[in-house]
Amino acid sequence: MVIKYFVILVISLLWPCWLHSQELPSEGAVLNYRLIPFQFSQAGNGSLEIAPGYFNNEDSFSSKIIKRIPFSGKKLIGEVPQFGGVYTWRVVYKYSGKKADHQAITGGKLHHFSTASFPLINRAKSRLRILQPGKRLKDEYVLMDGCSAMYDMDGNPVWFLPDMGGTITDATVIRDMKMTPQGTITFLRINPDETKVYEIDIDGRILWQGPDDGSVSGENSEHYHHEFTRLANGHYMIMGNEQVAYQVLSTRDSIQLYWEDKKRPGTDHLPFGTLIEYDNKGKVVWSWHSTSYFKNSDILYHTRAFYQSDIDVHDNSFFFDAKDNAIYISFRNISRIIKIAYPEGRVLCDYGERYLPGRDEIRNELYTGQHSLSKSANGMLYLFNNNTGSGSMPRIIKMKEWPGLPGYLIKVWEYECKTDTLNSAYADKYPFLSGGNVIEMPGGDVFVSMAGISKVFIVNENKKIKWSAIPEKWNEAVKKWEVIAQYRASIIIGNAALERLLFGSRIE
């Protein structure tokens, strides 16, 4: 009996705290987003009421209500008008009485939160200018790494990356920002002296950070770069580099390449790619070194002017194909893609131009300087083809493997990228050297980011643009809008994905 009363006492004391813990946003929270995940301590039917300002008096609150959102259950997503604002909210429950025609309405207590400010989402200083509106795109949102922010399809900022305890500064470059299958956000944070990779929740809390301890590279850092992806199995896969020593010895009749001890004086060093898979505790569970392929490849004969050997391959993208247990890796400088078996690491196939002794480099006509490697739902290979050195604009290409001929790809679809201010006549003046990506959407449409010139758009299989925009910032010195350079952009599709992102593990 004593134990029973003790349990009742503990529950009665903790009950108010437990109720409070179920409510979102928490009292007094300062949020870096305008799409607000509201969660209530009690399920039911009713409406959520929101007013701008801080109110403790019901009458003053009621006179300022700007939104009443009906709900059934215990959670919903509501949008508030602006960043840098204070808001009061409450839940009004509607209970049915014993008689069918009688209802009692009960108002809940008043709660408060505010939204923070951030320079890049100040609409007088920056904007996502809509070039072509999307008629039926209401549940999609774009993450722009150069803006460190998320926008709706009308160009309104709805989320920004907070400073994460001061680790994000004016000198910081954010790359490859995207939502994970688990409802979190991953990205690379590049500061002048280091590159780190993070997984965060919507509030900017760090959930996971790459160890960067050099256990794969054998150095003091893994030199993370280009792409960081959380896999469906919960693990993390990241591109890294290792410094590899080599020496090219040439005579009149032959060229030989010697791979040397990296500490040996007098040898040249180049970064060659690594690919690292970590578990959620930061333990390396798998890795791959690109030198395992290149040391026995035709890379020696990749030459530039005056027949100088150029073995700087520059890997810049990967795609993990869990269905086929394979990984595709893109190498920009040699316009090559290789496919390796996972987890064996064995090279299954390589795609691109072959290099031979004494022959000038032949331009790969299918793609050059490519970025953003991915696969479609039906197994086609997508590339953002920068078309480097071609004198034409970048292209989105979709390819399939030539039946019975491993190593050969057939182009099955192509779209030449365009902007309002730049076309193929200017492509030589604006070499597309880096960045850009393409993401297949449900139904076959593709979302594209054009990197340096920063246009983002959605195009369908019939090559009709369904939505497009360009991020810009105001240059006060010259009194005009200028492009905000992006590396890649990503898209969040559908209300279910948005709920995963905003509620995360807090969903009751």
Image (cartoon, helix red, strand yellow):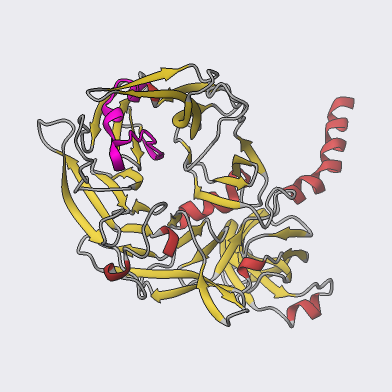
- Tell me residue 78's x, y (percent): 59, 65
Q: Which quarter of the picture shows residue 479? A: bottom right
Residue 311 covered by magenta stretch: yes
Residue 298 falls inside the magenta stretch: yes
**Horizontal placement of 385 versus 72: left or right?**
left
In the displayed structure, would residue 70 be above or below residue 410? below
Query: Where residue 154 appears, x then y in whole percent?
Result: 47, 73
Query: Along the line of sight, which residue is nearer the eye, 361 or 36?
Result: 361
Residue at 53% x, 58% y: name it: 146
Q: State which region is magenta.
A: 292-320
50, 184: nearer the viewer: 184
Residue in the picture at 63% in, 72% down: 122
The x, y position of residue 316, in whole percent, is 41, 41
- Place residue 348 in its image quadrant: top left
Q: Residue furthest front?
A: 252
The spot of residue 464 in percent (x, y) is: 24, 68
Instruction: Classify 444 as above or below 244.
Output: below
Q: Outermost residue toward the right?
A: 2
Judged left or right of residue 461, residue 142 is right
| Above or below, comparing residue 93 to residue 443 in the picture | below
The residue sitting at 56% across, 21% down in the picture is 218
- Name, please, the residue furthest toward the left: 404
Establish if 142 lies above or below 410.
Answer: below
Quadrant of the image occupied by residue 310: top left
The answer to whether residue 335 is visible is: no
In this picture, residue 269 sits left or right of residue 42: left
Q: Nearer the viewer, residue 351 or 38?
A: 351
The quadrant of the picture occupied by the N terminus is top right
Q: Is residue 61 left or right of residue 134?
A: right
Frontmost residue, 157 versus 52? 157
Residue 383 in view: yes
Total numbered labels placed on residues in the image? 0
